[in-house]
């Protein structure tokens, strides 16, 4: 079975608390359901804050020099199926667990005044979604991972469907159909994978570490990778499986957009790095040119779509497609710097997109429109708001000193580092793709700076603003939320070394898993 270490004896207890605290919050909200809405908000905010504090303790105690799982818990669950309750932290998920816990209280505080109907139910859905997302990141058993993966769908469906915009039913149905289709294929692949391992090795287990040892012919790897990749690519999302995302973002309440962009989209890229590529390495390497091409298309196409949008929420939604393309590019490079850059970019995008969606939600609450043409000169009307808007705009563009620069720069460096030897051997495609990917940075600057220029400068105009009733600038609550995100963006941009150290051994493990052939002797394979 999988090996794991934990030098911090209370680590497993704290990790279980981090995972299960949202369920405690659900119970408390249910018990207080007859109380006022404010109590539900306070319970959710308090539980999420405690969860973040515990996650921070685990992050600080995480040993960057120790390989394998840390703070792990393994308990038998369904023994006859080889299923166990196995959770733990490693260099892949430690930053994503911290990101999820950090955004939890921000989501609750951000929705403090905007959610007015069925407030207890809303916070129950947010807590359940937090539990499912955290579980998907810490699960180290494929059966457990799949349960959490599916569990995320229900609360997100209800958050959009009950508290969303006018076309929320259409958006939720599209979201569910896309996600469910990919998930069904992945379930079939999971069953086949586990049965194949049992037949070839006599071991019946869903543990990731055991499944990493499974040997399969290239043809079988290709089919199984296709099933896993479809499910993960829908979540990223990669072109051409991206069309559900703008509708979901536009119709979702601000809190739903923050969760969706901040955490849920990372499930797809995390699935590739943790399962898709390491489980089927020969197929992954064989299809790297195709997947890298789709990643670069996502970068450029997402940026071009963002450039022509008139809905301010759609601009940020399409930018997510572009930014997560860099994550896929870094992972596919198989270079240490690129892999680590991909992980940093996942976290950075979560912080920056969360900040931008919160800013859009704040102006929408004041003006009740998302049309870019309706705004102008907000720098004079809302100076504090405009300062925060420019900070997150420049972070999205990738300004040095911000987290956006660190992630994209490392991912692109990994892509060029991998492309140059291939170019010297006569294969120019990786170098061409890496070069085209750089244009995404230029396009990103174009659509975000166009957004800022129209939004903040020029003639003063904003719906519901008049000299008698001027728009109110940010409240203390709103400043606090955006201030916390700003600190995180600059902390990761100026001091990435700690995060890079914690991801280094995991990135090397990923390199080893994906570059080592696991086709059985005598079967057709590809050269590592």
Image (spheres, grey):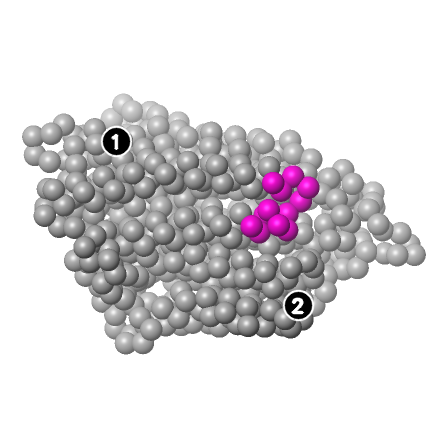
Label 2 sits on residue: 37
Please report the residue visible at 54 percent of the width from the left and 62 percent of the height from the top.
Answer: 124
Please report the residue visible at 73 percent of the width from the left and 53 percent of the height from the top.
Answer: 365
* Number of callouts: 2
- The dominant secondary structure in magenta is helix
Q: Secondary structure at mark 1?
A: helix
172 up-or-down from 10: above or below: above
Task: Tell me where residue 133 sits by quadrant.
Answer: bottom left
Please report the residue visible at 47 percent of the width from the left and 48 percent of the height from the top.
Answer: 153
Percent coordinates x, y for residue 370 in the rendering: 71, 43
Q: Does the magenta segment cover residue 170?
A: no
Q: Quadrant of the N terminus?
A: bottom left
Q: Is residue 113 left or right of residue 45?
A: right
- Read off the magenta span: 158-169
| First in residue order: circle 1 vs circle 2 | 2
Within 10 Å of disc 2 (Cα), the crowding (few <14, some 14-19, many 20+) is: many
Label 1 sits on residue: 222
| Residue 324 visible, this orientation | yes
Q: Nearer the viewer, mark 1 or mark 2?
A: 2
Q: Is residue 397 left or right of residue 512?
A: right
Judging depth in this view, the residue of 24 and 298 nearest the camera is 24
Percent coordinates x, y for residue 75 in the rendering: 24, 65
Judging depth in this view, the residue of 448 and 420 nearest the camera is 448
Q: CA distance from mark 1 to mark 2?
A: 51 Å
Q: Secondary structure at mark 2?
A: helix
403 up-or-down from 447: above or below: below
402 up-or-down from 511: above or below: below
Q: Is residue 59 left or right of residue 526?
A: right
Q: Residue furthest bottom?
A: 9
Percent coordinates x, y for residue 496 in the rendering: 42, 58
| Residue 444 visible, this orientation | no
């Amino acid at each position: 079975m999988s090996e794991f270490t934990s030098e911090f004896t209370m680590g497993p207890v704290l990790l279980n608390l981090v995972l299960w605290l949202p369920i405690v919050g659900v119970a408390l909200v249910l018990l207080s359901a007859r109380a006022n809405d404010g109590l539900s908000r306070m319970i959710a905010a308090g539980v999420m804050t405690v969860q973040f504090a515990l996650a921070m303790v685990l992050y600080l105690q995480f040993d960057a020099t120790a390989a394998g799982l840390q703070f792990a818990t393994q308990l038998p669950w369904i023994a006859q199926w080889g299923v166990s309750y196995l959770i733990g932290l490693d260099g892949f998920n430690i930053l994503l667990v911290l990101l999820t816990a950090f955004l939890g209280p921000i989501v609750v505080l951000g929705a403090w005044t905007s959610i007015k109907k069925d407030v207890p139910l809303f916070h129950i859905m947010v807590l359940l979604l937090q539990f499912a997302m955290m579980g998907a990141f810490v699960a180290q058993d494929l059966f457990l991972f799949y349960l959490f993966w599916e569990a995320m769908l229900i609360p997100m469906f209800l958050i959009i469907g009950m508290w969303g915009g006018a076309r929320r039913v259409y958006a939720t149905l599209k979201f569910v159909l896309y996600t469910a289709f990919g998930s069904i294929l992945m379930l079939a692949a999971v069953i086949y994978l586990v049965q194949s391992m049992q037949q070839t090795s006599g071991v019946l287990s869903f543990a990731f570490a055991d499944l990493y040892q499974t040997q399969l012919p290239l043809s079988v790897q290709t089919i199984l990778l296709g099933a896993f990749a479809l499910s993960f690519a829908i979540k990223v999302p990669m072109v051409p499986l991206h069309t559900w995302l703008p509708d979901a973002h536009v119709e979702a309440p601000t809190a739903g957009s923050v969760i969706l962009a901040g955490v849920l989209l990372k499930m797809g890229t995390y699935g590739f790095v943790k399962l898709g590529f390491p489980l089927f390495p020969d197929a992954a390497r064989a299809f790297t040119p195709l997947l890298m091409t789709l990643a670069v298309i996502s970068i450029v196409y997402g940026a071009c779509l963002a450039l022509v949008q008139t809905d301010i929420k759609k601009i940020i939604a399409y930018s997510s497609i572009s930014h997560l393309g860099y994550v896929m590019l870094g992972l596919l490079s198989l270079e240490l710097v690129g892999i680590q850059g991909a992980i940093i970019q996942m976290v950075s995008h979560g912080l920056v997109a969360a900040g931008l969606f919160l800013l859009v939600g704040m102006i929408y609450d004041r003006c009740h429109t998302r049309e870019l043409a309706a705004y102008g000169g907000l720098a004079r009307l809302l100076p504090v708001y405009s300062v925060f808007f420019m900070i997150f705009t420049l972070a999205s563009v990738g300004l040095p000193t911000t987290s956006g620069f660190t992630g994209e720069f490392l991912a692109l460096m990994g892509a060029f580092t991998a492309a140059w030897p291939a170019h010297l051997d006569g294969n120019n495609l990786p170098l061409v793709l890496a070069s085209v990917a750089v244009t995404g940075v230029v396009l990103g600057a174009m659509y975000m700076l166009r957004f800022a220029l129209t939004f903040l400068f020029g003639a003063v105009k904003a719906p519901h603003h008049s000299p008698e009733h001027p728009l109110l600038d940010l409240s203390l609550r709103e400043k606090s939320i955006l201030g916390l995100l700003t600190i995180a963006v600059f902390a990761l941009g100026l001091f990435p070394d700690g995060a890079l150290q914690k991801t280094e051994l995991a990135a090397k493990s990923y390199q080893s898993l994906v570059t080592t052939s696991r086709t059985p002797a005598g079967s057709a394979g590809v050269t590592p």
